[in-house]
Image: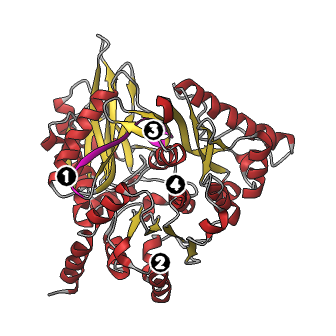
Amino acid sequence: MSSTDDMNRRFGELKKRLPAIWTSLTSNPEYEHTSVIVPSLSVNQDELAKVTGAAFYEERLLFALIRLRNPNARLIYVTSQPVHPDIVDYYLDLLEGSPQRHVRERLYMLSVLDGSPRPLTQKILERPRFMQRMRRLIGDTRKAYLTCYNSTDLERQLAVALDLPLNGLDPEHLVYGTKSGNRRIFEEAGVSHPAGSEDLFSEGEIVDALIELGGKRPSLQRAVVKLNEGFGGEGNGVFRFPVERADRDAVRFALHNLAWTSGTETAESFLQKFAGMGGIVEELIVGDEIRSPSVQLRILPDGRPRLVSSHEQVLGGATGQSYLGCRFPADDAYRTLLQQEALKVAEVLADKGVLGRFAIDFLVSRTASGNWNAHAIEINLRMGGTTPPYHALEFLTGGRLDPATGLFTVAHGKTKYYSATDNLRSPAYKGLLPEDLFEIVAKRRLGFRHADGTGVLFHMIGALSQYGKIGMTCIADSPAAAQELFESTTAALDEEIDSNAHGEQAPLLDRYFHME
């Protein structure tokens, strides 16, 4: 048996532990266990490099520290670079009713002290002594599990090396998460999706697919060319059909003039990556009114699909395809439709043995009669931008989602909503340290209030000083109140910076105040 076969066999054996751990966690709120969190962004590093402050996305799962509310839970959180201690304190202060000393004895913040632009999991695997230290801290692996941002062969190797089941996707199912795999799943599920072609690799295949699409859709003005492993809209190029849409030379020329979300992409580099990982061509859905909602789901260790949440995504960037933030939940007008379509996809994935969290992005368009049509766009078989804000809401309030309505309710039947972003940016924010932010939070009373279950939770705080970028989730009792809190919090940050003459106030970049 080869080492790869042995690795896969051992990984499969570890996976069998998950159902028992899951049953214990859900049936006993004080179940003794250890959660090991490795928030590695094990994705194409060229695409990741386009994301401002990508290294600090490792902080996006810090909401999981709230699991330490369970007095018998232990948590090991690993990052490339150390997390500022004030940031850790900020999250631990949210554990209302939990003695700080007792909580700290059960939390282990570890760092490999390596800021190089590589996946965190790879850095850990390169350090055998570090892994030995992790194994000693984990202790009884029969009551422990591993959580990662996404799953690749690196995460499989780490799970086996630590003798832990991976609470997420088996990497053998990654093919379903590629853009080509998405289209095949949508087709199998009978879910509406854009016209196009998948499993393309060469420039010639892209040209052929565009000509074919242009023939099928004579009125279509634009299409999207997507890398199989692009994410956050960064691997997408928008194609504009030439007048002679059947002319190969004209189509090829237009292909070399794609519109990019990233200002650093070129046709040469894009086509080179396309040849390596493959991709798709599909129509760009247009209409008088277009929105970009998403649905989060989870396939439990016992194989049952479960609805997690729905969101209105806020997109921006040069082509309007970069994720900037979200509102919870999706609009009443089509939320039920989205959930129904998403569950069809989840059932197909569950039949194929997929486990873990994922999200399905949709485009919805309103017809002249006022009805909404939903088109499935892609499946993200990993955690994403909508994961941290929803689970912050879940852990902070102790509420639950009603799968029938898609609304989130807390004690006494009150419903909660939020507006969130991981991309609030300003040149004037650069240089702000975590302690500066927390001074502003205290002065302006921008924290979360357990008494009424409303307020603000900041994340990706480490990116603030270098990049002038931060994330936040604003929770309130109505969509309007959540958005008002979002805008007032942003205004408070700007006022404090201006009043203290911090930096130079400049035109704001990539910010969104209004989610209409």
Amino acid type, label 1: Ala
- Tell me whether the residue at label 2 lies in contact with that at label 1, contact meaning CB atoms closer than 8 angstroms: no
Q: CA distance from mark 4 to mark 1?
A: 31 Å
Circles 3 and 2, Cβ within 8 Å, touching? The answer is no
Which of the two labelled residues, at mark 4 and mark 3, occupies the earlier sequence position? 4
Identify residue type, mark 3: Thr
Label 2 sits on what residue type?
Lys
The residue carrying pointer 2 sits among few (fewer than 14), some (14 to 19) or many (20 or more) residues within 10 Å by Cα, namely some
* Name of the residue lying farthest toward the right: 500
Name the kind of residue labelled 4 in the image.
Val
Please report the residue visible at 26 percent of the width from the left and 44 percent of the height from the top. 281
Q: State whether residue 329 is above or below residue 24.
A: above
Secondary structure category for the residue under label 3? loop
Residue that badge 1 annotates: 350
Q: Secondary structure at mark 1?
A: helix
Secondary structure of residue under mark 4: loop
Dot 4 alpha-carbon crowd within 10 angstroms: few under 14, some 14 to 19, many 20 or more:
some
Q: Which mark is residue 319?
A: 3
58 lies left or right of 406: right
Residue position marked by numbered label 4 in the rendering: 51
Total number of numbered labels? 4
For marks 2 and 1 on the same chain, the one whose residue lies earlier in the sequence: 2
Estimate the x, y position of residue 362 in percent, counting from the top left.
32, 36
Frontmost of labels 1 and 3 is 1
